[in-house]
C-alpha cells in the first residue's frame, strides 16, 4: 500500500517512557513500510546541540536509522523545542532536514509543511522569544557552552515556558487565520499540514472562491497521533497503547 505518514509533537522525554516505546514501535512497525515519514517538529522535548549525549533517545536514533536504511525517506522539520537539531543528527539517523516552510509533493498534491509556531502570531511574547532563539550568533555562542550549562539553561527555559503557557489565554496560542492565509499564498499552495498547537483537526475554508485545507497533527502526550496520506486521501488517526 502506498502511504506517507506525518507526525509532530512527540516530545520524547525519558520521564514519559511509554511514549518513547510507543513511538519506537510506530517507527519499526509502521513507518518501516511507508513510502515516507515527515516529522514536523518537536520530536524531542529538548535538544541542546548535536554534540550532547542523549541516552534517552538512543533507541529512537537506532529505529530511525533502520527505517531510513529500509529506503523510507524520513524528513525532519524543526520545532520550537528541537530547533538546534543539525547535521550530525541527520548523519547518525539518515533523516533529511528540511526548511521551516517546506513545500512537498505527496502523490501529485502540493502541500505546505510547517511546525506551526510561526503561525501563532497573536502570541507576541513567544514570537519575540523565538527571534532570540533563532539568532544564529546567539545559537553559536550557546553551543560553545559546556553541555551541563546548556542542560541547565534548557531546563530553565522549559520551566519558564510551562508557566507562561499556563497563564496565557487559549486562543492566543492557536494559529492566526491571517498568518495561515499569508503562508499559503506565499508558498502558492492550497494545503497546509502543521503541528505545535496540539489541536488535531482538519479545517477547510475558502478564500477568493478557492478552497483551502489546513490539517493539524496531534501530540503524543497520552496517545499516538499520525496523519496517513495515500493516493486516495488523508486520514488523521490516533491510537493508544499507553
Ligand atoms: Mn511546538
Image: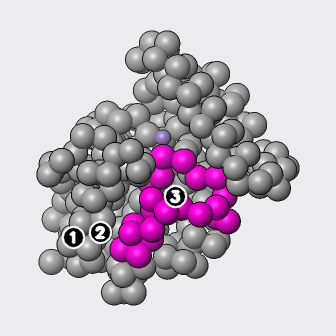
- Res. 77 mark: 3
Camera-near label (2 vs 3) is 2
- Res. 18 mark: none
- Pointer 2: residues within 10 angstroms few (<14), some, or many (20+)? many
Q: What element carries label 1?
A: loop
Task: Say whether residue 63 is magenta.
Answer: yes
Quickly name the residue at label 1.
30
Q: What element carries label 3?
A: strand
Residue 110 versus residue 86: which sits nearer the camera?
Answer: 86
Quickly name the residue at label 2.
27
Residue 45 lies left or right of residue 72; in this view the side is right
**Residue displayed at 68% across by 39% down:** 153
Q: Residue 86: x percent and y percent?
A: 64, 65
Q: How far apart are marks 2 and 3 (CA)?
A: 17 Å
Q: Residue 177: x percent and y percent?
A: 45, 28
Please report contact status of discs 2 and 3: CB closer than 8 Å, yes or no: no
Asked if ligand 1 lies within 8 A of label 2, the reply is: no
Q: Is residue 172 visible?
A: no
Q: Is mark 2 on a helix, strand or loop?
A: helix
Please report contact status of discs 1 and 2: CB closer than 8 Å, yes or no: yes
Q: Residue 96: x percent and y percent?
A: 52, 72
Residue 165 versus residue 39: which sits nearer the camera?
Answer: 165
Q: Which colour scheme is used?
A: one colour
Residue 234 versus residue 90: which sits nearer the camera?
Answer: 90
- Pointer 3: residues within 10 angstroms few (<14), some, or many (20+)? many
Q: Quadrant of residue 15?
A: top left
Task: Say whether residue 140 is magenta.
Answer: no
Amino acid at each position: 500500500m502506498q502511504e506517507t505518514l506525518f507526525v509532530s509533537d512527540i516530545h520524547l522525554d525519558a520521564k514519559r517512557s511509554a511514549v518513547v516505546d510507543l513511538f519506537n514501535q510506530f517507527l519499526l512497525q509502521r513507518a518501516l513500510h511507508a513510502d515516507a515519514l515527515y516529522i514536523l517538529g518537536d520530536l524531542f522535548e529538548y535538544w541542546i546541540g548535536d554534540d550532547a549525549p542523549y541516552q534517552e533517545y538512543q533507541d529512537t536514533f537506532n529505529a530511525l536509522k533502520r527505517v531510513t536504511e529500509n529506503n523510507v525517506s524520513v524528513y525532519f522539520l524543526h520545532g520550537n523545542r528541537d530547533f538546534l537539531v543539525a547535521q550530525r543528527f541527520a548523519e547518525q539517523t539518515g533523516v533529511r532536514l528540511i526548511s521551516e516552510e517546506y513545500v512537498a509533493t505527496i502523490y501529485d498534491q502540493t502541500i505546505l509543511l510547517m511546525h506551526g509556531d510561526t503561525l501563532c502570531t497573536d502570541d507576541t511574547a513567544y514570537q519575540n522569544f523565538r527571534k532570540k532563539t533563532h539568532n544564529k550568533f546567539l545559537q553559536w555562542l550557546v553551543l560553545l557552552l559546556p553541555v551541563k550549562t546548556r542542560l541547565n539553561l534548557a531546563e530553565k527555559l522549559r520551566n519558564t515556558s510551562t508557566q507562561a503557557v499556563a497563564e496565557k489565554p487559549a486562543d492566543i496560542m492557536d494559529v492566526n487565520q491571517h498568518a495561515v492565509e499569508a503562508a499559503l499564498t506565499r508558498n502558492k499552495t492550497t494545503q497546509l499540514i502543521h503541528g505545535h498547537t496540539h489541536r488535531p483537526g482538519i479545517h477547510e475554508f475558502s478564500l477568493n472562491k478557492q478552497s483551502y485545507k489546513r490539517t493539524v497533527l496531534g501530540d503524543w502526550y497520552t496517545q499516538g497521533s499520525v496523519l496517513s496520506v495515500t493516493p486516495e486521501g488523508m486520514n488523521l488517526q490516533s491510537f493508544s497503547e499507553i
